[in-house]
Amino acid sequence: MTSVLIVGALLLLILCLPVDLFRSKTAPGEPDARADERDVMFARMARAEGTPEYEDYYSRRPELKRTDDRIRAMTPLFEPGSKHYDPVISLEAGKYFRDIYEIEPDIESVETWKRRLEEGADQTLVVKEMVKALGAAAVGFTRIRPGYIYSRKGRFAEDYGEPVVLDHPGAILFLVEMDFDEMQKAPGVEVLRESAHQYWRAAVISMTVVDVLKGAGFSAKAHYDAHYDLILPPLAVEAGLGELGGDNILIADRYGSRVRIGAVSTDMDLAESLPIRLAADEFCTICMKCAENCPSRALSVGEKEDVRGVEKWPTDAEKCYAFWRQTGSDCGICMTVCPFSHRNNLFHNSVRSVIRLNPWIRYIALRFDDLIYGRKWKPQGD
Ligand code: SF4
Ligand code: SF4
């Protein structure tokens, strides 16, 4: 009996060895060339045949024309005809995106926070408190490396192709949580509504913060749905909000991929946040659950590749977006199936903490995750 206990204690000790505790934090690395927003899938889908922007884009990128024309011809996301279209839910989702253009930050809230900022001894702390009070799940600060600024605008015809000029040295990055139960319905249309809702919330927060900072005499710009000068996921990593996952989206501490990112760039002098280590990079290498469950096979189960000088798992944006158009939802299976995306509670946060310690715990945690939640994604209600 004693020897069994000793062996058990030894095994436990080995399992808990913090061999990875002092590994350096994972930083995504800065790309060696700036990305052109015109190449982003949503910008390409905004090009209408016969317009000067369409002619210009496909004269420079003729290899994308056939695929893009095929996807453009599919049923639009919020309209009848796709697999998961729902007359009520799809309409609600579309309304959130339209409402972003009507946002007017609450004047009382802006005035209150402006006063706090002007009185506060530590402005970094006040900004952090403000962004959280406005509804963000997490907030961090980082300097802006030029590689994360788009080179040219691409989303709208009005400024199509114009150089992006942003001279703010730093940015406030924040996360809004996507509802756990709604995400369990992926790839149902409820995910589209939840995404739209959180894009709207992120826009409200960023616009309110901009009004506060401008009121206090700083220069500031909101980066929100369709209005991004910045590439937010790697900046969120730099701001200590998480790591990049195998699906190339942010894995945030305590929320996994169930988040949307918002940002405000500014000339305000904010203390930079330290990057955090979740061991997501190592965990992804043995997991690949997102790629295996991706219905469009848009995610890679292979090795990382060099994308503009940065090592990452490649994503086939065309396959992913075509699936969205086919289903009438923005899918979300990769975000939801991710073991990091479980609920933000004591049990799951404890697991999130211990998997940082060593590879054996990560392996065991993954096997248990497969056992309890299944290796294959099954939407709630199926
Ligand atoms: S959103 Fe869906 S289709 Fe797109 S990469 Fe994720 S799982 Fe694949
Ligand atoms: S599902 Fe697995 S491989 Fe994909 S992002 Fe999450 S941890 Fe990484």
Image (cartoon, grey):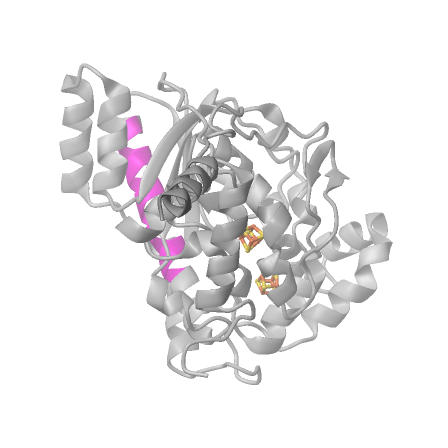
Q: Which residues are magenta?
A: 196-213
- Residue at x-position 56% and y-position 29%: 27
Is 29 situated above or below 280? Answer: above
Instruction: From the top left corner, tell me how far across and down residue 178 is, in percent.
Output: 37, 57
| Number of marks in the rendered image | 0
- Residue at x-position 34% and y-position 55%: 102
| Left or right for 203, reference 212 | right
- Residue at x-position 44% and y-position 37%: 10
Q: Within the image, what quadrant is residue 253 found in? A: top left
| Left or right for 124, reference 222 | left
Instruction: In this rendered view, identify the residue nearer to me: 351 or 205.
Output: 351
| Left or right for 163, reference 179 | right
Q: Is residue 6 visible?
A: yes
Instruction: From the top left corner, tell me how far across and down residue 370 is, in percent.
Output: 51, 63
Instruction: In this rendered view, identify the residue nearer to me: 363 or 267.
Output: 363
- Residue at x-position 43% and y-position 55%: 341
Instruction: From the top left corner, tell me how far across and down residue 150 is, in percent.
Output: 62, 36
Q: Is residue 228 visible?
A: no
Instruction: In this rendered view, identify the residue nearer to me: 289 or 181.
Output: 289
Would residue 298 be counted in the magenta stretch? no
Magenta span main SS: helix
Would residue 205 be counted in the magenta stretch? yes
